[in-house]
Amino acid sequence: MSQPVWFELIKKDKQTGARLGVVHTPHGDIPTPIYMPVGTQATVKAMTPRDLTDIDAKIILANTYHLYLRPGQELVKEAGGLHTFMHWDRPILTDSGGFQVFSLAKMNDIREDGVLFRSHLDGSKHLFTPESVMETEQCLGADIAMCFDECAPYPSDYGYTVKAMNRTHRWAERCLKAHTRPDQALFGIVQGGMFKDLRIQSAKTLASMDFPGYGIGGLSVGEPKHIMYEMLEEIAPYMPENKPRYLMGVGSPDCFLEGVLRGVDMFDCVMQTRMARTGMALTRKGRINMRNAKHKHDFTVLEEGCDCYACRTGFTKAYIHHLVKEQEILGSQLLSMHNLRFSLRLMEDVRAHIANDTFGDFARELLEGGIYTQ
């Protein structure tokens, strides 16, 4: 293939149509469906690259907005790109920073040329345009870069959502023209808010631009989950079958299953490490609050059968409870390892069931049990 990143659709689950595939990249193959740990500032919090390899993370994310502000894309480029800078030799995806510009910046002025905003760090003024974002992402050098888009907040009325969607489409065209790095793929982003007709229109428009992959943006921004699932169902028939579909910023276990049922291939979320830093563990029986006093004398591991470092080595709930209560860094590290590996193992099971045409039964059992709702 001449493209640096391309998708191979291996098969569909006979029960549900869920997709099993591989995203081929310059830094390795990514089996799908996949969960991607988030390394916002060129690091997955509380995890070393060795830890990420140990849990078998196939790809991680970094954030263009944050890296643009600190340490700056030119320094990362000087270091040899993100892979060299952070000592990670597997695939990386960088988002465009569009969501952060609209959600974190102290002020933003949306214009046709781009977005003028004030940094959430020091209030300094900056302008993001499709062209400048492409320059930044090409300096960072990830395997996959995302277009600069306008993410309409929830709720937004129809008129505003139309304007934001159309601007996203125009910016996507500008991103395509500005993106010239041959070893990096650029993904488009479907928008359209919570309006079915707009979602379909956006999916069709982006598909006509022939990106090598597609993000689905503007979901999981405060709307009820059933609305997100409806939007995914509406656009699925209009998304190219031979391109990966990436549901952006979504990562609870129930959403993994519901998303895969609706044709999603890629997910990312900070939930796993954020929960770890607040003392929460993900398990097949639901969440465990390691701050709870009932764990003080519990000498079992977080989850029997888990192969993460914390569980296979035998760190007990009693010990992790102690670490969390004393705010020791090791507590966050062990819980981060566990939560990330939990999510990756879940996706491994998802892929195995799709391969065996049993994903419908698997998903139904877990979802009806209610233990995966976050």
Image: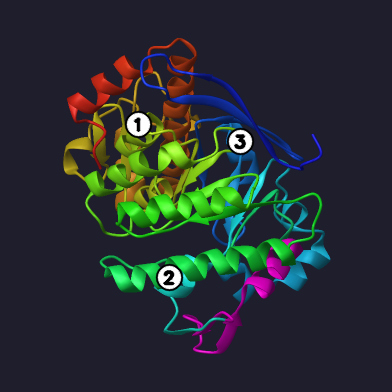
Q: Nearer the viewer, residue 98 or 282?
A: 98
Q: Could you tell me how far apart the alpha carbons at marks 3 and 2 are, in whole angstroms?
A: 33 Å
Check residue 347 for magenta coloring.
no
Q: Residue furthest bottom?
A: 124
Callout 3: few (<14), some (14-19), or many (20+) C-alpha neighbours within 10 Å? many
- Provide the residue span drawn in magenta: 113-139
Residue at image position (22%, 30%) is: 371
Residue 327 visible in image: no
Q: Could you tell me if residue 332 is visible in this image?
A: yes
**Which quarter of the rendered picture does the C terminus lie within?**
top left
The numbered mark, 3 or 1, whose residue comes first in the sequence reads 3
Q: Nearer the viewer, residue 370 or 265?
A: 265
Q: Is disc 3 placed on a helix, strand or loop?
A: loop
Mark 2 in CB contact with mark 1 (< 8 angstroms): no
Which mark is nearer the camera, 2 or 1?
2
Which amino acid, mark 2?
Answer: Ala
Residue 303 image offset from top left, x and y in percent: 34, 26
Residue depicted at 44% across the width and 65% down the height: 165
Task: Say whether disc 2 or disc 1 marks the residue closer to the N-terminus.
Answer: 2
Mark 3 and mark 2 lie on one chain; the one further toward the N terminus is 3
In this figure, which residue is indicated by the disc labeled 1? 257
Instruction: Tell me: 267 left or right of 207.
Output: left
Q: Please tell me whether residue 125 belongs to the stretch shown in magenta.
A: yes
Disc 2 versus disc 1: distance between alpha carbons? 29 Å
Please give the residue where the numbered disc 2 appears in the rendered image.
164
| Image quadrant in which you'd find residue 257 | top left
Residue placed under numbered mark 3 in the picture: 58
* Residue type, mark 1 in image: Leu
Q: What is the three-letter code of the residue carrying label 3?
A: Lys
Between 25 and 38, which is closer to the camera in this rendering?
Answer: 25
